[in-house]
Structure formats: C-alpha cells, structure tokens
Image (tube, coloured by chain):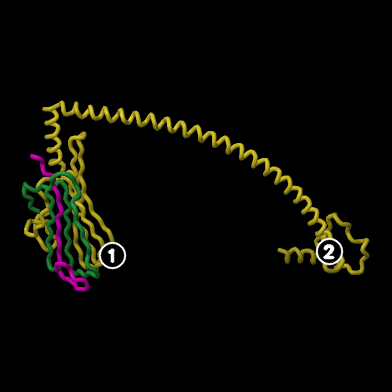
Chain colours: A yellow, B green
Amino acid sequence: MIDADNEDLEPAPRYDDGDASTAGEPDVLLDVSELRVDKISLEVEDLRARVSLQADVLGLLKLHVGVDAELGRVKLTIKGVEAKALLKVRLDNVARIIDRVLTTIDDNPDIVERLLEHVGEAVEEVGTGAGEAVDELGAGAGSAVEDVGGAVGDVGKSAGRAVEDVGGAVGQVGRGAGEIVADVDEGAGVDVGEARPRRRPKEQTSPGRPRRRANSSGTRPAKGSRSSRDRRTEGG
Amino acid sequence: MAQDGAHRADVEIVASAAADRLWFETRPEVRISFPGRGRRDSRQLTRRRNIDTPVEPGKTYRRVSAATRISSRLLDAD
C-alpha cells in the first residue's frame, strides 16, 4: 500500500480550485456531490464505507478488490460545512483480466475439460450424499410417525381421563349450586325477617323459590311510583 | 483529480470537506483496509488544511479542509 501526501488528490470544495472529474467515467458511481450544513454536532460509532468488486470464472479465476473505510468513534462539532463524497467502481480492468482468461481457455479448451471432470466427480459425491440423506430422512420420518401414534394414544387416554374429571367436576358443581341456592334462600329469609320483624315465619317465602326483594318499609312499591323510579335512578 | 495511467482504480472512495470551524471532543478512530485477493495496488491519500495530525481534542480549528482518496486496483498477472 502506498500512503503518500504529495500525490494529486480530490480537492476540498471551497478552498481548492481543482477539477473533481476523473479521467474516464466509472461504471458504478455514488455521488454525494454537494452537501452544505450550517452546523453539525456529530457523535458516531462504527460508521463504515465499503466498495467491493468480485468476479469469479469457473474455478480458474477469483478476483476480489475492495476498499473499507471505518470510523470507529468520533464526537465533533463542525460549523459552515461543505462536503462531498464519491464511491466509484470501474470494471474495465477486471473485464480485461477476465478477457485474458477466456482467451486462454479458447486457446486451451482442455482446461475446461479437466474442470468438467472435477465437476462430474463433485456431482457424484453430491448424489451419494443426497441418497444417504434421504435414507436417514425416511428412517427419521418413520420413527417420528411411530412417536406420533404413541402420542395420539396418550392423548386419547388423557382425553378419557379429562372427560372423567369433567364428569366429576360437573357433579361437584351441581352439589355446589345446590348449596349456593340454599344459602341464598337462607340469606333472603334473614333480609325479609329484618325488614318485617313482626311477620310470622310461616309467611316467609318457602326455600328454593324465587322471590321479589322487599323495600325498607317491608312493602313492595307500586309500579311507576316515585319511590320506585328514585330507586331505579339511584341504582343506576 | 489527476490520475496517472498506472493507477486507475477499480474501486475507490473519494471524500472531501471544508468548514469554517471544527472542534473535536474525542480523537477520531479511523481504520482503512483493503480486502481482496490477488495482487493489488492499494493507496490511501490524505490532505488536510489547518488541522493538526493527529487532531487535538478540545481545540477549535478554523477554515479547515480535508480530502481523502482510498483506492485499490487489481494487478494483472504477467
């Protein structure tokens, strides 16, 4: 690598008068030709610019040329900025190298024949490997199906147990519901008793039957009456 | 930019900037590399104006400019 400061270089936009154009247009160009910013406060970490060119010709030629510029970490303030940036790729040199390779192949076609022999061997190896893989896959699939069968059996057993459990739970719910109803009746009886302390026990609603709630005076309000409407309003 | 025929890059990054004022809080970490395969001619050219090398954090630089050209070219096998 040559790192020299005395060679010609792309000029900065404002303080130099050099021509930014280069001899021969690039095949790929990313041009940020003019960027002007009054003030930048910049804090960056791992900013990276990369240009890479890669070309392969069979197994004969592998070309790769690249440039990486990486700004690990920087924190700066800059005022009155003018900047520009160019990324360029030229293919003529690579094309010329590839052309020479192809010319060599033209002149020596046995090179390709030898390459194809190697390719044939590689394909055979791939075929053998694929066959083995399919065999293993088949065996694996068979055992997986067996496992699935076992799992289905287990599911069936579990489902049966679950149904049994549900049946038991339903029975318990039924018993629980009966207990709740009994509790409701007892509670309702107490409320009514408090509302109507003078009423005899035999006038209370018999257990297990639905009943209307009594008001605080012990009398049921008339339909559409004020107190009834008020109560509904208060109740929301 | 003048380019001699011996180094007409296959790939290159060219950047330049000028500013009235420049102030670094930390010294920048810059890394340049040339990934590839085969014989290559790779170059990094940098020119600065009114900026120390390396830069001094906390110092204000005025009327600054910087330009860099990073390039690489495959060399044909003889």
Instruction: Rate crowding at label 2 as few (under 14), some (14 to 19) or many (20 or more) other CA atoms within 10 Å.
Output: some
Check residue A70 for magenta coloring: no
Q: Quadrant of residue B20?
A: bottom left
Q: Secondary structure at mark 2?
A: loop
**Mark pair 1, 2: CA separation:** 77 Å
- For badge 2, the amino acid type reads Ala
Report the residue at 11% width, 51% height from top.
A21
Contact, mark 1 vs mark 2 (Cβ under 8 Å): no
Q: Nearer the viewer, residue A175 or A69?
A: A175
Above or below, A193 relative to A63: below
Q: Chain of mark 2?
A: A
Q: Nearer the viewer, residue A111 or A4?
A: A111
Determine if marks 1 and 2 fall on one subunit.
Answer: yes
Rendering coords of residue A5 (x, y %): 9, 60
Q: Quadrant of residue A57?
A: top left
Residue at image mark 2: A214
Q: Which residues are magenta?
A: B52-78
Q: Secondary structure at mark 1?
A: strand
Q: Nearer the viewer, residue A185 or B63?
A: A185
Task: Report the side of A27 relative to A202 (left or right).
Answer: left
Report the residue at 11% width, 45% height from top.
A24
Report the residue at 19% width, 62% height from top.
A82
Report the residue at 46% width, 31% height from top.
A138
Labelled disc at residue A142: none
- For badge 1, the amino acid type reads Glu
Residue at image mark 1: A43
Q: Chain of mark 1?
A: A
Rendering coords of residue B54 (x, y %): 16, 67
In the picture, which quadrant includes the C terminus of chain A?
Answer: bottom right
Earlier in the chain: of badge 1 and badge 2, it is 1
